[in-house]
């Protein structure tokens, strides 16, 4: 998995980078919040590790931006030297899932990274050829997508697009990332191929609030499929 680290202290960044590598995950380092925001235009990450005190944006501001733009399901961890109750409660209220205090203890950080990723991305789903989410099921062996047990008739590439979106539920997935995963290359901004396939997936699978899901095109970024609560689905459906 790919982890984004935002840390303006070079020594601290090098230490965390080494710890992340020890967990067998890739790590990309950023020295400030704006550089991460720019990178998210064409990259996606499975975990964000943020220093709470950054030179441009505060850690709280950055995690709020991540939650609004990237989604609610991608885990976020804070690194902080401030252990006051108000500071930690503020971090968690802003949207962080966990925090590690400085000075960093390598074994503790490694264990928390592994635990956070395990909770966010359960391994048992990866071993099951059938992905079941709400009324939808996607069978990676037969390449079939069903809504309440009925085959919706996706073409092969449409199924691959749907499988990638459902497999990244709640995450903002850049356009070129989907293109590479499905077509093996970046198609380019002038092509409507991806938009056409996403539109067909939305139409054939009837992805809408009354079925508990919402698929949105985030301008200049990519696509995000989110699962709604029962209450949200009823509200958006006008019930």
Image (cartoon, grey):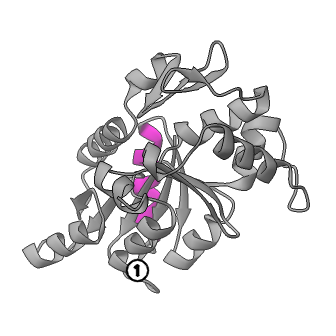
Query: Where residue 59 sits: x, y (%)?
Result: 36, 75
Question: In the image, 133: left or right of 79?
Answer: right
Q: Is residue 205 above or below residue 132?
A: below
Q: Nearer the viewer, residue 63 or 13?
A: 63
Query: Where residue 85 sits: x, y (%)?
Result: 8, 73
Task: Determine which residue is flagged by label 1.
Answer: 54
**Quarter location, residue 98:** bottom left
Residue 167 located within the stretch drawn in magenta: no
- Residue 135 seen by the camera: yes
Q: Nearer the viewer, residue 224 or 101?
A: 224
The 10 Å Cα crowd at callout 1, few under 14, some 14 to 19, many 20 or more, is: some
Query: Where residue 224 sits: x, y (%)?
Result: 56, 54
**Quarter location, residue 232:** bottom left
Q: Nearer the viewer, residue 167 or 35?
A: 167
Residue at the extreme top: 141
**Residues in magenta, as a range:** 10-22
- Residue at 52% of width from left, 73% of height from top? 31
- Residue at 41% of width from left, 66% of height from top? 67
Residue at the extreme front: 239
Question: In the image, 60: left or right of 180?
Answer: left
- Residue 11 seen by the camera: no
């Amino acid at each position: 998995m790919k982890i984004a680290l935002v840390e303006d202290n070079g020594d601290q960044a090098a230490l965390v980078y080494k710890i992340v590598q020890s967990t067998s995950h890739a790590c990309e380092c950023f020295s400030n919040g704006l550089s991460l925001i720019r990178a998210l235009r064409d990259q996606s990450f499975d975990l964000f590790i943020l220093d709470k005190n950054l030179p441009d944006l505060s850690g709280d501001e950055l995690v709020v931006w991540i939650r609004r733009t990237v989604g609610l399901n991608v885990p976020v961890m804070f690194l902080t030297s401030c252990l006051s109750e108000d500071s930690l409660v503020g971090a968690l209220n802003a949207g962080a899932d966990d925090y590690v205090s400085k000075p960093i203890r390598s074994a503790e950080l490694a264990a928390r990274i592994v635990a956070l990723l395990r909770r966010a991305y359960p391994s048992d789903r990866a071993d099951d050829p059938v992905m079941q989410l709400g009324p939808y099921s996607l069978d990676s062996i037969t390449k079939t997508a069903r809504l309440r047990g009925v085959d919706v008739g996706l073409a092969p590439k449409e199924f691959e697009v749907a499988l990638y979106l459902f497999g990244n539920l709640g995450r903002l997935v850049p356009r070129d990332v989907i293109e590479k995963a499905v077509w093996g290359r970046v198609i380019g901004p002038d092509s409507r191929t991806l938009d056409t396939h996403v539109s067909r997936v939305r139409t054939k699978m009837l992805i809408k609030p009354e079925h508990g899901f919402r698929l949105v095109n985030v301008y200049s970024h990519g696509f995000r499929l989110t699962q709604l609560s029962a209450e949200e689905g009823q509200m958006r459906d006008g019930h």
